[in-house]
Image: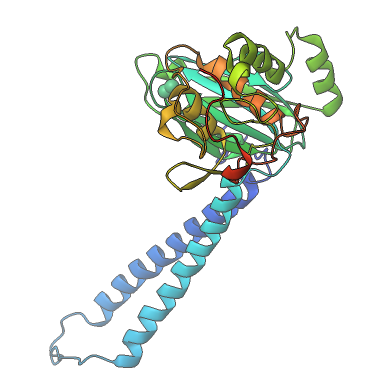
Amino acid sequence: MFDNFPLWPARASTTAGNVDALYIFLVVLSTFMSVAIFVMILAFAAKYRRRPGHAAEQIEGSTILEITWSVIPFGVFVVIFVWGAVIFFQERTPPRGATEIYVVAKQWMWKLEHEEGHREINELHVPVGRDVKMILTSQDVIHSFYVPAFRIKQDVVPGRYTTAWFRPTRPGTYHLFCAEYCGTQHSGMIGQVVVLEPSQYEAWLSGGGTTGSLASTGQALFQQLGCSTCHRSDTQGRGPNLAGTFGKPVLLDDGQTVIEDENYIRESILNPSAKIVSGFKPIMPPFQGIVSEEQLNALVAYIKSLNQNPSGAAGSPTLLPAGTQPQAPKVQ
Ligand code: CUA
């Protein structure tokens, strides 16, 4: 009956049902309260209307009544808050081992890169039932990655990475929108997410041409840009050994500790002097304006890949503590 007038977009991710359940709860609760209030206004207006022989009288406060009408709404709001927070944290926390897709937004298109090296524009192919983590950035203004069927909407901000994740539950083709006004062609910044059966997805993967995985592209760049001359896989480099460091704490020269995530790697490439690893000199040149967003993604993917197959066994598994690292440049 409502085929041409759907109240909800398709539910095609694991979180869609949870979001809708909370939404329906809020709508039902609000409707119930609104109807109750309006009915009572009308009923009391009729009951206490002005009549001969009835005079208004002052009613003093009732503590029991006031506690009741404070505690019950408080309980209801706590339920809404906790329920919302649980869904929020689910949506904010990508599961371990999720397939990673790098998304670069620009006026006015979506560029998507798979770990395997496949690149797509305004179209994303993913297999059903697999967790997909997106690492998003913009090369110009703020955009927003919005897939109603997955109930995800994530701002895409220039100069940093944001993340979002979903697990598609139903094969199909779903709308992708930009949900942040980003210029004259904003309304045309649309695309689609194609959810395939795993076998179809494998076929799709093997069909498209690729020049190697994102990590291998990053590895080539790492050599080409000369990163490998200082970030060596032993302890003799002038820069930290990066093998196996992703996701681990890094001790900085000001005594602070930060977790090495995508944004840390990004900053360390573009503006290396922002955070200096303890025991090293600020000698690395900034790569701001030298590497594109796509190249940056490849470098990030490469450094992350060193966790699975660290090429240097000699290095300390983390950048902590500083004592295991060389204290100063050996040459020059
Ligand atoms: Cu991009 Cu609106």
Q: Is residue 23 left or right of residue 222?
A: left
Q: Nearer the viewer, residue 260 or 116?
A: 260
- In the image, residue 181 sits, relative to residue 109, either above or below, namely below
Residue sitting farthest toward the right: 199
Q: Quadrant of residue 45?
A: bottom left
Q: Nearer the viewer, residue 45 or 224?
A: 224
Q: Quadrant of residue 121?
A: top right
Q: Residue 110: where, in percent of width, then height?
A: 53, 18
Q: Nearer the viewer, residue 304 or 240?
A: 240
| Residue 5 visible to the viewer | no
Identify which residue is drawn at 70% across, 28% down. Answer: 234
| Residue 78 visible to the viewer | yes
Q: Is residue 91 left or right of residue 180?
A: right
Q: Residue 205: where, in percent of width, then height?
A: 79, 17
Identify which residue is drawn at 75% across, 33% down. Answer: 314
Q: Quadrant of ligand 1?
A: top left
- In the image, residue 299 sits, relative to residue 68, either above or below, namely above
Q: Residue 43: where, in percent of width, then height?
A: 32, 75
Residue sitting farthest toward the front: 331
Q: Residue 316: where, in percent of width, then height?
A: 69, 39
- In the image, residue 254 sits, relative to residue 201, either above or below, namely below
- In the image, residue 289 sits, relative to residue 267, either above or below, namely above
Identify which residue is drawn at 55% across, 61% down. Answer: 83
Q: Is residue 311 left or right of residue 84?
A: right
- Quadrant where the N terminus sits is top right
Q: Quadrant of residue 8?
A: top right
